[in-house]
């Protein structure tokens, strides 16, 4: 292997050596220089250094993808992928570099690959047999990748075809939808991070931006420092290492919001610097995540802090529980949620830094940051005003960058949030706007849990319960603990008359989050009612309703749990309690004083909308038709 700015690096698993060799021979036969390591004696510092040099110098990086690579959760090829992704973040968006090639029938949607691979077109070459168009395509890309050359903008990624597809075409998203259940409590567990460190913070999702972000742009940049643990407690040291890895992985899991420094860079900086300011400066980040592990009776507590690197001020704190015998929290969602909250505290600091600046001076990223923080801060008090203010900022950003990922994401979330239902006289207008943004986003990221759950929710609203179930199934298949997918699937099952399945599916979620999220308890109360377990329904509803604020109680999606309580008490023969609960409902939702008005008020995606046994219970409580 020689050094060359025109070389192609082939990365493959040992099991895919034959198709990799066939591809290598086809490219070399066409005069393309290929770096293809066939050594049986892999390993050692010299070999590792050579591989790193080649990835740093090559013109194109071709990862060979297959069921073999998917099944290998560990392997040196994954380090090669990471090094290539790291380098790609330092390149202009239009420069070709990553060229994934699939050599069998691997499903692109569920493939275990870095997110960055999904940003480019994939090619399918059965058994590594290269087609003439693919070889010509590689030759053309090598010409565009030459130093100083300018390439045309990269088209949207398309699903892999049966043969090599040369000009990329618009992709078709996988079925998807958007869940309403926890959007209020945890909008977008958009847990952060570019999978590798790149100093150029481009427009989110590689979309257009008013001007290229400069190499000095350090907005929403993070470094996760090693977690501290008592050195005498070997188990605590292991927990610190494992949770630190999980936190870092959560930051790297999504390209929407932030950038995070690779662990190796942090390790090297920590060895040289002890002061937080010096670490932030050396790593060129705005924010540091640090924490410590302490033993408690049932395991360990991990206390986490988001710190402003310039001032060393703590911006936010979160804690995680690790049970005895485990190294990380039992629920991965807990880690994601903690990372989201720490990220949001940092985002607020970024927005404070631009508070005094006029809107006209803000670029796409600052417009979206300000829109999100303003909406999240104000929606509980003035939902309509918060929506209008955020929408004005997002519309401005859309004019500048119509395909910006983050702008589309927030436009969908703001318009499809249940909070719209409390004030809008024409919610179909918001649903249409949100659905359009959602579909555009899903064409970019077909595996987004929040967008998929929104899509499922729209299906529920339209009475397309089977379609909603299919979409929710796809979310749960990606993440069995999904706080979006599990509740959405449970609602779809409930709508289809499969309440027992809904209960079994959501039971772990109820047990884990029931004390924190009233909408989860409300869902459980509705499932209990559908199962005819009136006592359990009353118990869950009476826990959920006091935890809801006035806006949630008036909301026609979550608020109907108050009617579930009325009907369940009436079914139990508790006439006085049913009457009292009905009076409380009337106080929350004035004017909805008949079953006909209830049917008009309740949204189609409410758990028990159109459920006749609910209306029968309301009649028992004395509500007129």
Image (cartoon, grey):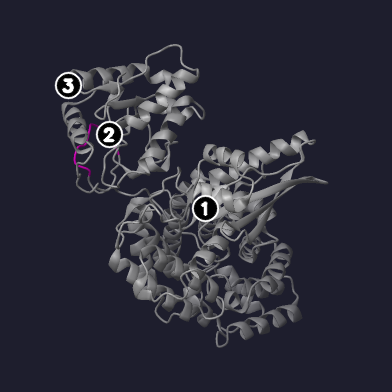
Is disc 1 placed on a helix, strand or loop?
A: loop
- In this picture, residue 23 sits left or right of residue 281: left
Callout 1: few (<14), some (14-19), or many (20+) C-alpha neighbours within 10 Å?
many
> In the figure, 246 relative to 314: above or below?
above
Q: How many residues crowd around disc 2 within 10 Å: few (fewer than 14), some, or many (20 or more)?
A: many
Sooner in the amino-acid sequence: mark 2 or mark 3: 3
**Closest to the observer, 436 or 299:** 299
Q: Could you say which quadrant of the image residue 545 lies in?
A: bottom right
Secondary element at tag 2 = strand
Residue 240 in view: yes
Q: CA distance from mark 3 to mark 1?
A: 44 Å
The magenta-colored residue range is 160-168
Viewer-side label of 1, 2? 1
Closer to the chain start, of discs 1 and 2, is: 2
Closest to the observer: 135 or 565? Answer: 135
Residue 376, numbered circle = none
Question: Residue pushed farthest bottom?
Answer: 591
SS for dot 3:
loop
Which residue lies under the disc numbered 2? 123
From the top left corner, tell me how far across and down residue 247 is, in percent.
Answer: 59, 46
**2 or 3: mark nearer the eye:** 3
Q: Residue at x 44, y 70 (%)?
A: 371
What's the CA distance linking mark 1 and mark 2?
A: 29 Å
Q: Which residue is mark 1?
A: 191
Q: Is 259 placed above or below 41 here? A: below
Residue 109 painted magenta = no
Give the labeled residue for mark 3: 30
In percent of width and height, residue 523 lies at 61, 62
Upstream in the sequence, badge 3 or badge 1?
3
The answer to whether the residues at label 3 and label 1 have Cβ atoms under 8 Å apart is no
Q: Position of residue 533 (x, y in %)?
A: 70, 61
Which is nearer the eye, 313 or 292? 313
């Amino acid at each position: 292997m020689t050094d060359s700015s025109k070389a192609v690096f082939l990365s493959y698993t040992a099991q895919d050596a034959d198709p990799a060799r066939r591809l290598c021979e086809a490219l070399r036969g066409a005069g393309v220089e290929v770096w293809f390591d066939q050594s049986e004696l892999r390993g050692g510092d010299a070999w590792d250094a050579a591989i790193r040099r080649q990835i740093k110098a090559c013109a194109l990086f071709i990862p060979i993808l297959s069921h073999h690579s998917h099944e290998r959760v560990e392997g040196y090829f994954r380090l090669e992928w990471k090094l290539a992704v790291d380098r790609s973040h330092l390149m202009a968006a239009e420069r070709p570099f990553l060229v994934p090639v699939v050599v069998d029938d691997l499903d692109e949607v569920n493939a275990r690959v870095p997110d960055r691979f999904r940003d480019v077109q994939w090619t399918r070459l059965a058994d590594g047999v290269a087609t003439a168009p693919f070889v010509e395509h590689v030759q053309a890309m090598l010409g565009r990748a030459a130093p100083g050359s300018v390439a045309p903008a990269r088209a949207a990624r398309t699903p892999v075809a049966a043969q090599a597809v040369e000009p990329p075409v618009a992709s078709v998203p996988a079925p998807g939808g958007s869940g309403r259940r926890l959007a209020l409590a945890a909008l977008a567990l958009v847990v952060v991070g570019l999978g590798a460190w790149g100093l150029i913070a481009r427009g989110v999702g590689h979309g257009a931006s008013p001007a290229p972000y400069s190499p000095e742009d350090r907005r929403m940049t993070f470094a996760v420092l090693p977690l501290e643990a008592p050195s005498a407690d070997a188990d605590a040291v292991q927990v610190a290492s494992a949770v630190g890895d999980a936190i870092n992985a959560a930051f790297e899991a999504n390209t929407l919001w932030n950038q995070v420094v690779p662990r190796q860079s942090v390790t090297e900086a920590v060895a040289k610097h002890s002061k937080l300011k010096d670490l932030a400066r050396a790593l060129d980040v705005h924010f540091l995540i640090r924490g410590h592990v302490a033993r408690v009776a049932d395991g360990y507590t991990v206390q986490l802090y988001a710190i402003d690197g310039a001032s060393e001020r703590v911006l936010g704190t979160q804690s995680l529980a690790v049970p005895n015998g485990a190294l990380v929290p039992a629920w991965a969602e807990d880690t994601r949620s903690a990372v989201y909250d720490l990220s949001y505290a940092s985002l607020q600091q970024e927005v404070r830094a631009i508070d005094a600046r006029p809107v006209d001076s803000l670029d796409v990223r600052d417009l979206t940051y300000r829109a999100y923080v303003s909406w999240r801060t104000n929606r509980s008090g003035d939902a309509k005003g918060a929506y209008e203010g955020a929408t004005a900022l997002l519309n401005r950003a859309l004019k500048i960058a119509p395909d910006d990922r983050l702008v589309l994401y927030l436009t969908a979330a703001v318009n499809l949030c249940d909070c719209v239902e409390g004030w809008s006289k024409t919610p179909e207008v918001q649903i249409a706007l949100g659905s359009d943004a959602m579909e555009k986003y899903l064409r970019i990221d077909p595996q987004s849990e929040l967008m998929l759950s929104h899509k499922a929710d729209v299906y529920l609203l339209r009475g397309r319960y089977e379609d909603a179930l299919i979409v929710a199934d796809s979310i749960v298949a990606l993440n069995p603990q999904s706080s979006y997918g599990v509740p959405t699937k449970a609602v779809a099952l409930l709508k289809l008359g499969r309440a027992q399945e809904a209960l079994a599916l959501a039971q772990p979620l109820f047990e884990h989050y029931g004390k924190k999220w009233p909408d989860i308890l409300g869902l459980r109360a509705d499932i209990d009612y559908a199962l005819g377990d009136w006592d359990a329904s009353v118990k869950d509803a009476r826990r959920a309703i006091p935890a809801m604020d006035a806006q949630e109680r008036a909301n026609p999606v979550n608020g109907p749990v108050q009617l579930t309580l009325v009907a369940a008490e009436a079914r139990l023969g508790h006439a006085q309690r049913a009457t009292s609960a009905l009076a409380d409902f009337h106080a929350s939702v004035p004017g909805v004083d008949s079953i006909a008005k209830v049917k008009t008020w309740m949204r189609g995606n409410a758990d028990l909308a159109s459920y006749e046994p609910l209306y029968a219970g309301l009649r028992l409580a004395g509500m007129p038709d």
